[in-house]
Amino acid sequence: MAAAQQLMKKGKRHLAIYIKSQCLTGTGTGGVGHEHLKCILDHLLDPHMVVDSQDRFDWCRTIMAGGISFEEFAATVRSYDNATMCGFVWTSDYVAYRCRTCGLSPCMSLCSDCFLAADHSGHDFNMFRSQAGGACDCGDASVMKPLGFCSRHQPERATQQTAPHELLVVADLMMSCLICRLLQHLRDPSAHVDDESYTVILPETDHFLDFLQQLSDMGAAMRTVITKTVCDSELYRRFCDESSGPTGTQANYKERLQSLKRVPVPEAFRGVLGLDGPLIHTCLLDELFFWMLKYEFPQKIVTLLLSLLPDETYKASFIETFVKHYPYVSIALVNTKDKPRMSNSVVHISVQLLSPVQLATQMVTKHNLLHVMFICLMHMMDSILMGSDSITSLVENFFPGDANPQVVDCSTPIMRDHSYWPIVSDVINVFSHRFIVVDYFLSNRDLLSYWAKIIACFQGMNLNIRELVQHVEYEPESYYAAFSAELEICASPMWALLQHLEDESSKDFTKNVIEIFSQQLHRWFISTNTGVFIKPQPSHLSFHYPLHRYLSVFIHSAIVKQGMSFRELNLSQEFLQLLMIHPLQLLVGFHEIYAGLWVRNGLQIRGQAMTYLQCHFCNSTIDADFYLLQVISSQLDADHFIQTVLERFHVLDCLTFQSNSELFRGRSFLARDQEMPMLEAMLSFLCMLLSIRTYSGEMTQDVTRQEMVALLCMSDRTHSQLIDSFPEKCGLSGQAKDFEQVLKTVSDYREPVYEHGGTLQQGKYVPTADTWVNLYDPLHVLLRSLHRRDFQASIDRYTEHVKQHKLFKGSSNVWPPFRIPGPLHPAFIGLTKLLHCRTMHGLIFVLLYKAVSDPNIPDAIIFYTVYLLELALTLPNPDGNKREIYISTKHKDKEFCNWFSSSNIFLNLMTVIPQMTVSYYRRKELDMRVDVLGPSSSSSASGVFWTVVPASQNQSSDGSNASPDPMALQIFDNPLFAISGASQMDVVPAAGAEENQVAPKYRHQGISANLDQEQVVEQVVVDQSILSLLLKLHSKLLGKSGAYLPFQNIGGNDVWPLADSRVGDGEYFIRKILDTICLKNEDCRCYISAMTSSQSETGKASSESNAEENRRKAKEKQDRVMKNFLSKQRVVMETMFGSDIDSPSAEEADAVKQSVFHCCICGQPTASLDSRPVGLTALIQSSSVLGHRRHCSDPLLLHLSDPLPHINNSANEFRKRLVALKNDFEEGSWMMALNSGWQGGVHVQTCGHYLHLDCHRSYISSLKNVNQQQSQILQVQLGEFLCPVCRQLSNTVLPIPPTSTVGASTVPEQLLVQHVAELLMAVRNQPVESPLTNAMRSVMQDLTNATYPQYRLFALGSSIPNLLMFIGSLLRANLEMELVLRSNNQTMAAAANLVQKKSCIFPLFHVLSMHYKIGMAYPSTDLWSHITGVNMEQQSTSLSLYLKEVPLMLKDACTMLIQLVLSLPPEFSKSVYSCIVQALYNVQLVQAVIIVSCKFSADEHEAWRLKGHRAGCSQMEALMTFVIESLSRCAIYADLEPPVPAICQSVWSPLSVEETVLDHLLPFLRLSAQLRQHLFEEELPPVSSAPVQGNRAEFELLVTFLGLAQKGSSAESKDSGLICTSCLRWFTDNHELLVQGWCQHLVQALGQQPSSLRLLLTVNPTWYPPQLLQLPKSYDQIFQFYRKKQCIQCRSQPKSPALCLVCGQLICYKEECCQKNSIMESVQHSIDCGGGAGIFLIVNSSIIIIIRGPRAAIWGSVYLDKHGEEDRDLKRGKPLHLNEDRFRLLHQLWITHSFDHICKQWILHNNQL
């Protein structure tokens, strides 16, 4: 210790030089240099000292650097980095890239530096945020193609010069000490062996691990030093020997090692793996991995070990270490408390080892990794297996077999937290390598059998039991864990295996899989007592049969892809029957859920059914089940299969001929309201079974097309929605390689648009016309519909399309265009036998019979039945037509197989079934008398009548008296058999029965077991064939009898009358079937001809009576509807116009001549009166839009470099003028010299709807009572409400003044000045109290509250000037805002489309005028005298009274206009307004001339001074000369501008002076004209947009509109148009004296030092409309620059950076680092920059957040991908580009203050954004 301290006295640098020199000159490890280094390191790395000392590591860094700085040392070592692989390791939330064009593995990823340094243009890549961490694969040819390598990791880099020995000699000697010291700390004996020890030990190693990571990051040279150390077995042996003493750490290490739990090894695998013995560590790496496992994979150790993987020697050692510890990792995954973090860390490691095929193959073949993974997974599942009770109940009458089945418990944490996922992920990665799958796994029957045993653990899991009595109390949430487990553990490896079995060379392996899984299924059938004659339990349901699905998909691969025959699979008929039981029961249960049978089980059971169909599962669940049933049905007897389906769907009772089945049928499984849905479900199942070709015939591209069409027909979808919803075979990438090609053929792209309601539509794909007509398959849509409304939406969209394109012109319902399926694979041709069996034909017969006779049969059952018949006629019978067999003449009900003599469809079509034998049971106490008569021509009965005579008393089934008359006869009329034109079964009523007696409802609850029953056999007369039923159904749908004519009789030619189209209604499709029958079979055609000729006569007679009856019923229905409507309308009117609304008063009656407004609440048309004023709904909001105007028309570009540029806008210039005036003049003076409101002003807008103020108060009161539901939208306590008409946000009501502004103009022109003065003197400060004035006060309060406090007061202690300045600024800001919108025609046009707005300047003016006059301390006559030069008391032009004020030449003319107009009484004439404008025009012109003169050079001053004295000079020249001479006595012209070289000077010509003066006049003229337009309701003519003469044309238009143009203009003005001076008109005889006075006042104010006020004389009058920052075309430029940029406030990198699109400032979004006074930075910035309105681009999300006052909303994004779609949160990571239309829309919404109206999803941000 003393020696070390003595050496350390040399200092860090000198000691480092000394140690390095000694190490280089010493020999062997025992040299002096080595001894000194060891002495120093023993001191610095003393185990008894704190390991995490920063000073000690500084010593280590300096010593390792050898005398130079550590940074220089690192750079030098890095220069020798010749590694060809990057290997950069990142943690979660790192932004990385994945290029599918370059990748050979789906797990390939690149760091951002490597990706940006390579050329990936045109590649299919995406950016992503890593969830679990990863490593860069750049340079690894086993994972990615070399074309994607960056320039730093090319193969030729390996030839670079290696690092010299002297550079790393010290590091090499130090490394062993460093690693051993780390292990000593991890072995810390003071830490107890518990789960929490890592919380104490690990934080102390942070600096240590950071130092080692710095060394690893130096490149291949330093990594070699580290890896050589950690893999050195001899070094580890010495380390263990040295730490074995009493004070060593070896004992604690051994104790920890022995505490590890071991995974038991199956008997079959013992001796194979080497897992029986203890875990033995042989190097430092082994123990380091062990501690990483023990401390649950701390991120820094994981990163360190992974960063060393580019070293090949280390990689081999790490693989062996990883496999050695793998079983213990699986146990740790179960026991850890932080399962997500640890799972991510394990996957982070394993994916780096298993993705490269060489490494994975080495681990499997050499280290038996596959065995290890299977054993670990099975051990994990064994711990959560349940007993047999949960699964044996799948079948009825269970008798235990030899082995009880066990299944996993889905409610355990292992399943719920997906603890198995790291192991399963490794299995999938291993299965992605063909060599391992084909040559190792599938060739090993023991391994394959063990895998089948693992899969069997999930067979029948998550069993559901149907609740029959009451609703389930607790809905389990384990179902999604079950689906996830099947998808991840069973399905994903299954698809990974199948991708290697694509050709005939691998068919033996496929047979192995089928054989082994069949054996496993046999064992499962035995254990569950599943037998051919044992029915499944109908009230039990499981969605999980992975063994069946494995068999299904491997059978498909064997037959379709590998060309095997079904016979080669050795699947017996008995096994197929067993195999059918559970998939069929599952599909029946699935349909029961949608039919409402499982409603008492809660929402979770429906969630299971929807998950079963969900796109990520359907290929592995319902598709596999359907295909397996298709295979089975193609091999089994067709009649047996159809009969089994009917029994399982419980629909046989729905298919009976029994009359009045409601009364006499036995207890049915289905309730009455469930029969039709289940019957429809059964038919849809059969139709899909026969027509779906997903696995049984269609090619890959056809399947892709079918899936895409189904998605598009449900709804228009974005590209990402199509990708996300497209069915996938989980675990496989690039399965739909023809996705884009198919998408182009079946859809049209619709550009992203904006909807009027405020929704930003993204680019979507819509089906083409050809897709609807030829490709839309309703059955496949039904198969993929999570909700039945999705299927119905596709039908509605299809109907709309065919009617819109005039493909269907009828008024009836369009039938779904079921498609004739494509060809079947030869192995499954037996599937069509289902259509040609007698059971199917009997089913079709009874369904057609019910469709004809029962009006309550749904249309769906009819079109499914017709479709089945069409398939039977279209698809041939593979067995041919069987010969006739003997059939009993008695046709028994429900025995469909015995109704027809053969399977010949055409023979069965003509077969007449005369009667049906129906057998049922009845109660003995009911006396039934039924007289059945044969067919009679005189019979008038239309159905079957029953006469029921109770034996004792007339009592209902529940025991209550059903009728007061115990002997009343009850006649039931069953319309089931009311078939027009057919022979009927006549029943003679009992004696005494009245003919018209109507039967009461009878509820039958079934036959009780304790009552005597007797069997009744009934013969029901049918006398129909399928053809006769088709003809009657055709007549029924068409509405007239005998309408069908066989096609050969049309025109006498045998031609096909119908096009091959699938568009039509029921009549069309039935007619098409009849035509097909006639075309294919001559006997059937003759049969139809005979029947149609006999029906034609009877049809004509009945059609006329039916038409008259229909007209009568329609008239009665119309009368009932109108009567009901009038009644409801009367109630509404009485409610609206009851006692709350008074009748018009006398005052209102006298106001007929005034403007009439319609109140949008009460609906009364009234005038606005003082007693009951009418108001205009308005929205008041703070705004700084005007403050962002600039002198340049080009938008500012968003800066992508530092520093942030300064933006000179109107708000900044206003502040400068304000400071200049404030410093030199009194408050009362300067505050009246200009307006504010450019920043933090108030903008008022209206939707244009009127309401009474008392109605408004009632409306607000009602909102306060129901505001709970709208608390996120409205702040009613602050006066917010939605307009009752247009639902736009409003927060005040502007009262409409009852009188017109225009007064009588009888004052002569020469007395106007005096008249204006009198009006200004006559103003009363306090208005008369009335409801109108009270309303105006309320509005003024709203205006004040809407302004943020910092923008209300401009000086302290001056309330009156503040108030007047505030009021004038309100009017000025709103006028200027209208001018901004008017100046931008495109913006105005677009804004008009967004929100239809009306001006509210007129009512706002009157509110402000009243309060302006209240706040005035004295009249404005002094100002008026100053302007006109006329003294009101004495006709003089003395200006001595005004010399202490701000000079008139420094005041804003617009400000003075607003002051004077607001000071006038409510009634003033146009002439008064014109007089004021004329006087101020004179002031503005002189002021403009002074400003222009300040821009002259000295020579130009002299030249222009002389021009005005020449004869014939213009009026402008004379005025300029006069001004220059008047101001020449002060220093105003001194050194205003630096001298400019003569070659650069521009001469001020008269024309240029004129144009410049005109530019200064235009702002005043525009505002004056705008105000006049609103005050006097005059339309301002449009301004010419000529580029050259635009300003002059606008000037001429404005002065003409304002009445400033003189009638007698000079010749000069006639030649060149109106000029500025031609509009001058003075109100005093000696105007030169007036102008001289103005100039003298200015000279006196400037004094001897005019520099402080020169700013006021060098203004640029031209302001262009405000614009948002121009954004770059590519979003990646913004993302890459701003995601790493520091915040200017906290000087740190924001976690969620946001960018203000108005000023470009970067802020910390939702972070507390920059908050002030509990207000987050984004909210505060929205106030400072936008007056409460902020537009922020969230850099990490690409979305735009709008902040408006207390609310915030997500607007959308202006950056879209190539498919016109947003990428919120950058989840897809596709390149984004600026959408100009959206950006223009965003700008328009901002400049028009329309966010409150357009954005719908507002939230209250509570200052927390």
Image (cartoon, rainbow, N blue to C red):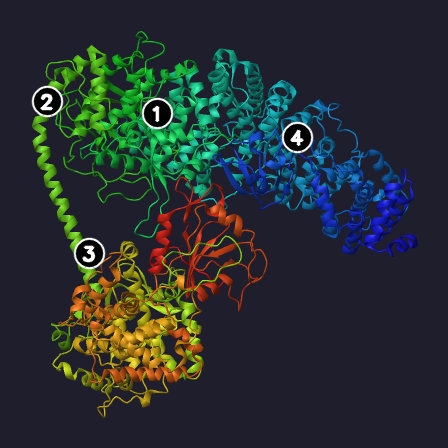
Residue 1463 x/y as whole percent: 26, 81
- Which residue in the protein does label 1 denote? 687
Q: Amino acid at mark 2?
A: Ser
Q: CA distance from mark 3 to mark 4?
A: 73 Å
SS at badge 1: helix
Q: CA distance from mark 1 to mark 4?
A: 43 Å
In the rendered structure, the answer to whether residue 379 lies left or right of residue 96 reads right
Q: CA distance from mark 1 to mark 3?
A: 47 Å
Q: Amino acid at mark 1?
A: Cys
Q: Which mark is residue 1096?
A: 2
- Which residue in the protein does label 4 denote? 373
Dividing the picture into quadrants, the one containing residue 1223 is bottom left
User: Residue at (22%, 30%) from the top-left corner?
Assistant: 1065
SS at badge 3: helix
**Local crowd size for mark 3, using a 10 Å CA cut-off: few (<14), some (14–19), many (≥20):** few
Mark nearer the N terminus (1 vs 4): 4
Disc 1 to disc 2: CB gap under 8 Å: no
Comparing 420 with 422, the one in front is: 422
- Which residue in the protein does label 3 denote? 1128
Mark nearer the N terminus (1 vs 3): 1
In the rendered structure, the answer to whether residue 1275 lies left or right of residue 1507 reads right
User: Residue at (36%, 65%) from the top-left corner?
Assistant: 1186
Dividing the picture into quadrants, the one containing residue 907 is top left
What residue occupies the far top of the structure in this picture?
Answer: 883
Comparing 1258 with 18, the one in front is: 18
Comparing 1647 with 1681, the one in front is: 1647
